[in-house]
Amino acid sequence: MKYLISTLWLSPPDDLKSRIERCIDEAAELNRSKKPVYIFFRADDIAVPTKQFKRLMEIFTRHRAPLSLAVVPAWLTHARWEAIKTTCQDSSSLWCWHQHGWRHVNHERKGEKQEFGPARPASVIKTDLIRGRKRLELLMDDDFYEAFTPPWNRCCKDALELLNELGYHALSRDQDASPPAPEGLVDYQVNVDLHTRKELDPHECWDALLAELKAALLSGFCGIMIHHQRMNDAAFDFLELLMQAFSHYKDLCPVHLKDLVRLSKAGILSQPFRQ
């Protein structure tokens, strides 16, 4: 796959630290109820233990922050998984390794990219879902968690119903994804996009990102999507600053997918998750 770096990370503002802190301060000030705000980081396109991947994991380990990692089954090999485990084993409780499609290949001839879209029959979709899940179960054993993030954050109604039928614990797409998840399959959506942004003007891009972050914090659930292959030094520096800023607020609660499912089952969480 070809990964591009957003204009956001080519022109970071000089006052970035203060802008991040001001954004979170304003959200905290407006959160008069002081209810917990859940912070959910999801890293996509995982399977290859590159230097960028190692740097990402070092940041989360250093800040003791949970991370949900969407693993592409066809990209993962035994050797790659052993290398990943070597990097991450000292902080294994922080990670939620789950399924990111099968091969991360687009099968739609027109319209938006989808691996599990309407162009393919349900029987073929089911075969690939099971194939991907079995591969991750074989390679990752108990480290694999039965949750699903579709490539490009999109999948069709048949795929959603099959995920429910196959007993997946959770789904994660982006904000306002459609079609809605069937009853019984909760969709923990990301609502802040760090690395696949489309704005061309860097000033507009920064304004949009910080507005997204503030709105997400005010909603009570901040789901942040990461693509480490698209990260340069500026992007890693931003993530470090964001982690530092979050740590100053006791009402901000970092979680991963396993935590979210557990909290939902306990009746602690209900909104803004969709099913």
Image (spheres, helix red, strand yellow):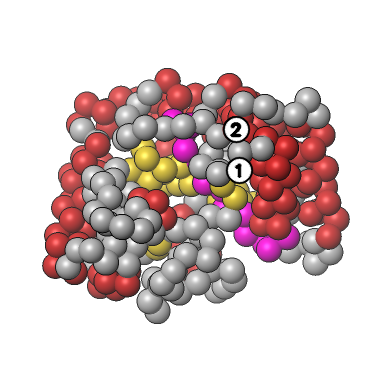
Identify the residue at image location x=59%, y=50%.
192
Q: Is residue 173 magenta?
A: no
Q: Is residue 147 visible?
A: no
Which of the pair 268/56 is nearer the observer? Answer: 56
Question: How busy is the neighbourhood of tag 2: few (under 14 within 10 Å), some, or many (20 plus)?
Answer: some
Q: Which residue is mark 2?
A: 7
Q: Quadrant of residue 242?
A: top right
Task: Report whether 147 appears left or right of 81.
Answer: right
Look at the numbered disc 1 and give the secondary structure of its residue: loop
Residue 250: percent from left, percent from top: 74, 49
* Amino acid type, label 1: Glu
Question: How busy is the neighbourhood of tag 1: few (under 14 within 10 Å), some, or many (20 plus)?
Answer: some
Q: Which residue is mark 1?
A: 199
Identify the residue at image location x=62%, y=59%.
221
Which of the pair 37/23 is nearer the observer? Answer: 23
Q: Is residue 227 magenta?
A: yes
Residue 164: percent from left, percent from top: 30, 71
Residue 246: percent from left, percent from top: 70, 42
- For the residues marked 1 and 2, what is the alpha-carbon distance in whole angstroms? 7 Å
Q: Which span of residues is magenta-colored?
A: 218-230
Q: Is residue 72 visible?
A: yes
